[in-house]
Image (cartoon, rainbow, N blue to C red):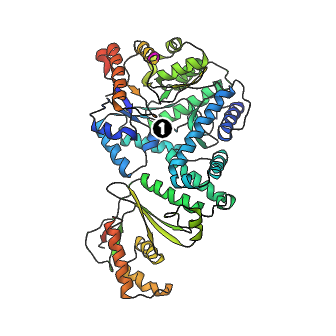
């Protein structure tokens, strides 16, 4: 299944289902929970029409302070109300000293952080009564690291029992920014834990820095990395992320189709994974 | 908490830089990349506030606006986990820090309050109205209101003026009913006289128009047939606008 992020910019077209027709949609609970009025009606139509996966923004699993249980209560109720099949979040933090910062900040790759985060993932999984799927985020600088990114991720997966969201563009971005081999990095991940894939575009802002913007089309090397990765994975849902510079829908549909072709080529009959 | 004090401090330092832009040394961090984090985060905050307060952003002096945004994000603990609620944090910060005086914009809180009310109403959860019937007595029945409204009391006419000079010239007492249309979700507002604001407030509290009219002399308001007719005409207007939905027959 290949899906797309449900955005207000092209919600009407998604609901019409003519110019663009993904297999599923994904949205951030934070952008839709506890709302009413016009957009709640649109949301109801969307969930009647498409299977739904959710990708959170504000859990801030890497924050030093305790988890926000009020927030989690809302998330749980939202996931149940809309029968969300998969809930993913980011291996990062967006809040410190209880102040939200609305973006994904890099966690220090340190042993105490592994323990801290694994405990919190376990807490969330117990509370939500479902596995948490953690995205390996793009990052632009290491922060006081005492272990490699790869070891950090593998330790968290092993200790917490979480699943992984493999954002192939993020791996490409990180490999470029931090000078490692993307394929070798993916090869060493616990690939049996990958439950979801994201694909997106990015922007190079300096000779040695790429920013993960979700504002450009996916580039060929990222498609190639996805093609290579798909051959090493069991079938999982794949999402096209496009948050800014929204192009003509035909262009987005073209990207969806290209992703579907790669999935079909490698996953054949095992293609359906979201019930 | 399994996090060491050292790692906690590193995260605090990083976050402090993101919020203030003041350089801090953290082992292993590339300053140029750190600056990109600051830019990305700050753009989200700026864009959200410009979208949430379009009138304030378009009409307040740009330098003052930028100073407010900077002060807000660097000092205020943003509690909203939903980014669309960030403007409420901004408005709260303005009130807590007396920005009307600090920035010499006496109508600032009114303007932020009005714009936040529109944003809040547009997004707020649906609130079911009480059970009602379509016909009844304007005078004797309790009235059923659309619950998606805010009744604002303002010192300045920020809902109909944008020029600083004109706003300041018209300091007074203004009452504005902001509401969400049930069918489309669009936000509308209407200015009320002090009397109609009082009537609306009392009706919303479940008092009948007859009881409100009986109380009016205590407010030094002479109840005349014209006042009663005008008040009922106003209620009919609210009904047309879907603010007033019908009659509650106890």
Question: Would you say residue A33 is visible in this rendering?
Answer: yes
The residue lying toward the viewer, choosing from A98 and B236, is B236
- Helix, strand or loop at mark 1: helix
Question: Residue A16 placed where, x, y %?
Answer: 27, 38
In which image quadrant can residue B138 be found?
bottom left
Point 46% across, 78% down: residue: B195
Q: Which image quadrant: the C terminus of chain B?
A: bottom left
Give the magenta part as a residue range. A212-221
In which image quadrant can residue A207 be found?
top right
Question: Residue A179 placed where, x, y %?
Answer: 60, 15
The residue lying toward the viewer, choosing from A106 and B235, is B235
The residue lying toward the viewer, choosing from B140 and A250, is A250
Find disc 1 in the rendering and name its residue.
A127
Q: Is residue B21 left or right of residue A179?
A: right
Question: Would you say residue A94 is visible in this rendering?
Answer: no
Q: Classify mark 1: residues with Cα within 10 Å, few (<14), some (14-19) or many (20+).
A: few
């Amino acid at each position: 299944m290949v899906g797309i992020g449900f955005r207000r910019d092209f919600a009407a077209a998604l609901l019409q289902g003519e110019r663009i027709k993904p297999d599923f949609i994904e949205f951030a609970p934070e952008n839709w929970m506890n709302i009413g009025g016009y957009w709640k009606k649109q949301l109801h139509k969307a969930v009647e029409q498409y299977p739904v996966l959710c990708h959170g923004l504000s859990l801030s699993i890497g924050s030093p302070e305790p988890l926000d249980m009020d927030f989690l209560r809302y998330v749980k109720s939202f996931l149940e109300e809309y029968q969300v099949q998969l809930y993913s979040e980011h291996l990062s933090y967006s809040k410190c000293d209880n102040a939200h910062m609305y973006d994904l900040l890099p966690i220090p790759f340190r042993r105490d952080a592994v323990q801290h985060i694994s405990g919190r993932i376990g807490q969330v999984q117990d509370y939500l009564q479902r596995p948490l799927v953690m995205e390996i985020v793009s990052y632009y600088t290491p922060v006081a690291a005492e272990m490699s990114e790869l070891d950090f991720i593998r330790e968290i997966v092993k200790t917490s029992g979480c699943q992984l969201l493999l954002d192939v563009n993020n791996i490409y971005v990180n490999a470029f920014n931090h000078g490692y081999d993307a394929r070798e990095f993916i090869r060493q991940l616990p690939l049996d834990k990958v439950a979801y894939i994201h694909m997106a575009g990015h922007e190079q802002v300096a000779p040695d820095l790429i920013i993960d913007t979700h504002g450009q089309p996916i580039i060929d090397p990222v498609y190639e990395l996805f093609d290579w990765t798909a051959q090493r994975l069991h079938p999982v849902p794949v999402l096209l992320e496009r948050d800014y510079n929204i192009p003509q829908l035909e262009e987005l549909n073209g990207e969806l189709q290209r992703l579907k072709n790669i999935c079909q080529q490698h996953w054949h009959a095992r293609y359906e994974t979201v019930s | 908490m399994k996090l060491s004090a050292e790692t906690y401090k590193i995260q605090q330092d990083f976050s402090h830089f993101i919020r203030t832009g003041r350089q801090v040394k953290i082992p292993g961090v590339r300053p140029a990349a750190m600056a990109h984090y600051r830019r990305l985060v700050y753009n989200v905050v700026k864009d959200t506030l410009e979208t949430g307060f379009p009138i304030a952003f378009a009409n307040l002096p740009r330098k003052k606006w930028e100073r407010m945004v900077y002060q807000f994000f660097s000092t205020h603990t943003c509690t909203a986990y939903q980014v669309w609620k960030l403007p409420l944090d901004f408005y709260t910060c303005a009130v807590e820090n007396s920005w009307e005086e600090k920035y010499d914009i006496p109508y600032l809180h009114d303007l932020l309050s009005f714009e936040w009310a529109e944003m809040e109403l547009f997004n707020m959860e649906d609130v079911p109205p009480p059970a009602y019937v379509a016909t009844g007595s304007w005078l004797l029945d309790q009235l059923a209101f659309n619950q998606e409204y805010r009744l604002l009391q303002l010192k300045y006419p920020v809902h109909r003026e944008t020029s600083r000079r004109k706003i300041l010239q018209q300091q007074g007492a203004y009452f504005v009913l902001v509401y969400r249309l049930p069918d489309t979700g669009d936000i509308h507002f209407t200015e009320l006289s002090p009397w109609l604001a009082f009537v609306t407030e009392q009706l919303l509290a479940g008092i009948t128009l007859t009881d409100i009219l009986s109380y009016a002399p205590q407010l030094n308001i002479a109840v005349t047939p014209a006042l009663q007719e005008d008040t009922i005409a106003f209620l009919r207007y609210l009904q047309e606008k879907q603010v007033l939905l019908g009659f509650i027959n106890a």
